[in-house]
Amino acid sequence: MRIPSTDTGAEPHSIQTVPRIWTPANVLTAFRIVLTLPFLYLVKQGLFSLALLVFFTASLTDFLDGFVARRFNQQSALGRFLDPLADKLLTTATYIVMAIPHPGFPSIPVWLAFSVVIRDVVILIGSLLIYLITRFKGFTPTLLGKVNTFVELGLIVWFLVFNTTGAFIYLLPGMYAVVMVSILGSGLEYLIEGVFILVKHRSSTRTRAG
């Protein structure tokens, strides 16, 4: 007996996979944002040892999220947005709160905190202006920008370690200088990148017009 064919000649439906938004890498980045709040609270309460533990954990996620994203191919548009946002929130909030005087605990220099905040604000405004002029969206951290984030986070870790233990405090002025050089160097690099984007946009506009 011949069994009638059920094949209609139609192509089998392909299964479409939806990209995962909350990958482990993105969860680590979001965790860094969340840790900003308990860190600020602990500093306000004068619990600097616990604040150091929380901040060190947050800083560690800055390395881990990038490593996980590259190792397991989890790069995503959300990750490219969240990672610099997490860095900016953590560093800006931390430098502001650590520059405020605390009873029985030193503060970082106000001029250093001001420099950290102003650099981030200028980069943010510059990126917005470039987008409004050119519609360019491919902003990525530069090499010096990554170095700057590393030294800014590192300074806070060692500042808390030195002042909690009372050891090696004499090293801090030199570390302040390193952070300042990093701020200036990375800021200059971002400025050059911004000018390059504007020049390229102007050249392409002239080419189309011609």
Image (tube, grey):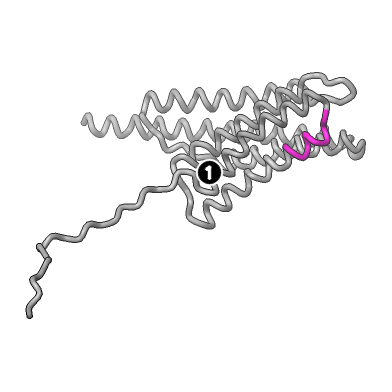
Whether residue 102 sits left or right of residue 6 in the image: it is right
Q: How many marks?
A: 1
Res. 174 in view:
no
Whether residue 60 sits left or right of residue 3 in the image: it is right
Residue in the foreground of this view, choosing between 149 and 160: 160
The secondary element bearing badge 1 is classed as helix
Q: Main secondary structure of the magenta part?
A: helix
Residue 146 in percent (x, y) is at 60, 41
Q: Quadrant of residue 144?
A: top right
Residue beneath disc 1:
26
Res. 36 in view:
yes
From this view, report whether residue 161 is shown above or below residue 44.
Answer: below
> Residue sitting at 66 percent across and 31 percent down?
36
Q: Which residues are magenta?
A: 47-54
From this view, report whether residue 101 is shown above or below residue 153.
Answer: above
Mark 1 crowdedness (10 Å alpha carbons): few <14, some 14-19, many ≥20: many
Q: Quadrant of residue 175?
A: top right
